[in-house]
Image (cartoon, rainbow, N blue to C red):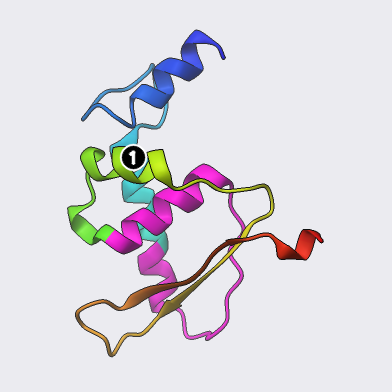
Protein backbone atom coordinates (compact mmCIF):
# COMPACT_ATOMS: atom_id res chain seq x y z
CA UNK A 1 0.00 0.00 0.00
CA UNK A 2 1.12 3.52 -0.57
CA UNK A 3 1.03 6.47 1.79
CA UNK A 4 -1.71 8.36 -0.08
CA UNK A 5 -3.99 5.32 -0.15
CA UNK A 6 -3.44 4.64 3.55
CA UNK A 7 -4.16 8.30 4.34
CA UNK A 8 -7.30 8.21 2.19
CA UNK A 9 -8.62 5.11 3.98
CA UNK A 10 -8.18 6.94 7.28
CA UNK A 11 -10.47 9.75 6.06
CA UNK A 12 -13.33 7.26 6.38
CA UNK A 13 -12.53 6.66 10.04
CA UNK A 14 -11.84 10.21 11.26
CA UNK A 15 -14.66 12.78 11.11
CA UNK A 16 -14.08 15.59 8.57
CA UNK A 17 -10.58 14.50 7.54
CA UNK A 18 -9.50 14.72 3.92
CA UNK A 19 -6.45 13.94 1.81
CA UNK A 20 -5.84 16.72 -0.68
CA UNK A 21 -9.03 17.05 -2.75
CA UNK A 22 -10.01 13.37 -2.40
CA UNK A 23 -13.45 12.15 -1.43
CA UNK A 24 -13.88 11.56 2.32
CA UNK A 25 -16.50 9.84 4.48
CA UNK A 26 -18.92 12.78 4.44
CA UNK A 27 -18.66 13.08 0.64
CA UNK A 28 -19.26 9.41 -0.11
CA UNK A 29 -22.01 9.11 2.50
CA UNK A 30 -23.83 12.04 0.88
CA UNK A 31 -23.32 10.44 -2.54
CA UNK A 32 -24.89 7.22 -1.20
CA UNK A 33 -27.82 9.19 0.23
CA UNK A 34 -28.39 10.83 -3.15
CA UNK A 35 -28.19 7.45 -4.91
CA UNK A 36 -30.79 5.93 -2.58
CA UNK A 37 -33.07 8.96 -3.07
CA UNK A 38 -32.70 8.63 -6.83
CA UNK A 39 -33.60 4.93 -6.68
CA UNK A 40 -36.60 5.67 -4.46
CA UNK A 41 -37.98 8.17 -6.96
CA UNK A 42 -37.84 6.15 -10.17
CA UNK A 43 -40.93 4.15 -11.16
CA UNK A 44 -39.22 0.94 -12.33
CA UNK A 45 -39.59 -2.08 -10.07
CA UNK A 46 -36.38 -3.90 -11.05
CA UNK A 47 -33.15 -1.94 -11.37
CA UNK A 48 -29.58 -3.10 -11.85
CA UNK A 49 -26.96 -0.93 -10.18
CA UNK A 50 -23.31 -1.63 -10.93
CA UNK A 51 -20.67 -0.17 -8.64
CA UNK A 52 -17.38 -1.02 -6.98
CA UNK A 53 -17.23 -2.83 -3.65
CA UNK A 54 -16.30 0.11 -1.45
CA UNK A 55 -19.22 2.23 -2.61
CA UNK A 56 -21.64 -0.70 -2.47
CA UNK A 57 -20.74 -1.23 1.20
CA UNK A 58 -21.19 2.49 1.94
CA UNK A 59 -24.53 2.45 0.09
CA UNK A 60 -25.81 -0.54 2.03
CA UNK A 61 -24.53 0.84 5.34
CA UNK A 62 -26.31 4.11 4.57
CA UNK A 63 -29.45 2.11 3.78
CA UNK A 64 -29.23 0.28 7.12
CA UNK A 65 -28.27 3.21 9.37
CA UNK A 66 -30.17 5.95 7.55
CA UNK A 67 -29.39 9.59 8.20
CA UNK A 68 -27.70 8.66 11.49
CA UNK A 69 -24.90 6.90 9.58
CA UNK A 70 -21.60 8.15 10.96
CA UNK A 71 -17.88 7.46 10.94
CA UNK A 72 -18.37 5.35 14.08
CA UNK A 73 -20.95 3.05 12.44
CA UNK A 74 -18.84 2.84 9.30
CA UNK A 75 -15.81 1.74 11.33
CA UNK A 76 -17.76 -1.21 12.74
CA UNK A 77 -19.53 -2.05 9.47
CA UNK A 78 -16.40 -1.82 7.33
CA UNK A 79 -14.46 -4.04 9.71
CA UNK A 80 -16.89 -6.95 9.53
CA UNK A 81 -18.63 -6.70 6.16
CA UNK A 82 -16.56 -7.60 3.12
CA UNK A 83 -17.32 -8.20 -0.53
CA UNK A 84 -15.96 -10.49 -3.19
CA UNK A 85 -15.32 -9.56 -6.78
CA UNK A 86 -18.60 -9.66 -8.78
CA UNK A 87 -20.69 -10.36 -5.66
CA UNK A 88 -24.41 -9.69 -6.15
CA UNK A 89 -26.59 -8.04 -3.52
CA UNK A 90 -30.34 -7.62 -3.70
CA UNK A 91 -32.08 -4.69 -2.04
CA UNK A 92 -35.77 -3.99 -1.82
CA UNK A 93 -37.48 -0.65 -1.35
CA UNK A 94 -41.01 -0.57 0.03
CA UNK A 95 -42.35 3.00 0.12
CA UNK A 96 -45.28 1.86 2.28
CA UNK A 97 -42.98 0.78 5.10
CA UNK A 98 -42.36 4.11 6.81
CA UNK A 99 -40.20 2.62 9.57
CA UNK A 100 -37.73 0.63 7.43
CA UNK A 101 -38.39 1.12 3.71
CA UNK A 102 -35.09 -0.47 2.57
CA UNK A 103 -34.40 -4.17 3.03
CA UNK A 104 -31.22 -6.12 2.32
CA UNK A 105 -32.45 -9.44 0.88
CA UNK A 106 -29.20 -10.93 -0.47
CA UNK A 107 -25.64 -9.93 0.41
CA UNK A 108 -22.61 -10.50 -1.81
CA UNK A 109 -23.81 -13.72 -3.47
CA UNK A 110 -21.09 -15.08 -5.73
CA UNK A 111 -22.54 -18.53 -6.49
CA UNK A 112 -22.82 -17.50 -10.14
CA UNK A 113 -19.04 -17.83 -10.36
CA UNK A 114 -19.42 -21.61 -10.01
Residue 99: quadrant of the picture: bottom left
Residue 66 placement, left or right of 78: left
Residue 103 horizontal/vertical position (percent): 38, 74
Magenta span has 54? yes
Residue 79: quadrant of the picture: top left
SS for callout 1: helix
Residue 92 horizontal/vertical position (percent): 44, 78
Task: Please name the residue shown 32% across and 85% down the image.
Answer: 95
Task: Please name the residue shown 42% across and 25% down the image.
Answer: 9
Task: Please name the residue shown 35% across and 74% down the image.
Answer: 102
| Vertical position of residue 7 compared to residue 43: above or below | above
Q: Specify few, some or many for label 1: CA neighbours under 10 Å numbering under 14, 14-19, or 20 or more.
A: some
Residue 66 versus residue 105: which sits nearer the camera?
105
Residue 88 versus residue 32: which sits nearer the camera?
88
Please tell me whether the stretch drawn in magenta is mainly helix, strand or loop. Answer: helix
| Vertical position of residue 17 compared to residue 77: above or below | above
Among all residues in the image, which is located at the extreme bottom? 96
| Vertical position of residue 48 compared to residue 21: above or below | below
Residue 48 horizontal/vertical position (percent): 61, 70
**Magenta region, residue range:** 36-64
Residue 87 horizontal/vertical position (percent): 64, 56
Residue 73: quadrant of the picture: top left
Which residue position is annotated with label 1? 27
Amino acid sequence: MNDVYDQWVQTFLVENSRVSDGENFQDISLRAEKALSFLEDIPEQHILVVTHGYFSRILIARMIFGKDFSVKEWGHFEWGVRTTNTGLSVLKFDPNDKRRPWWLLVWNDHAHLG
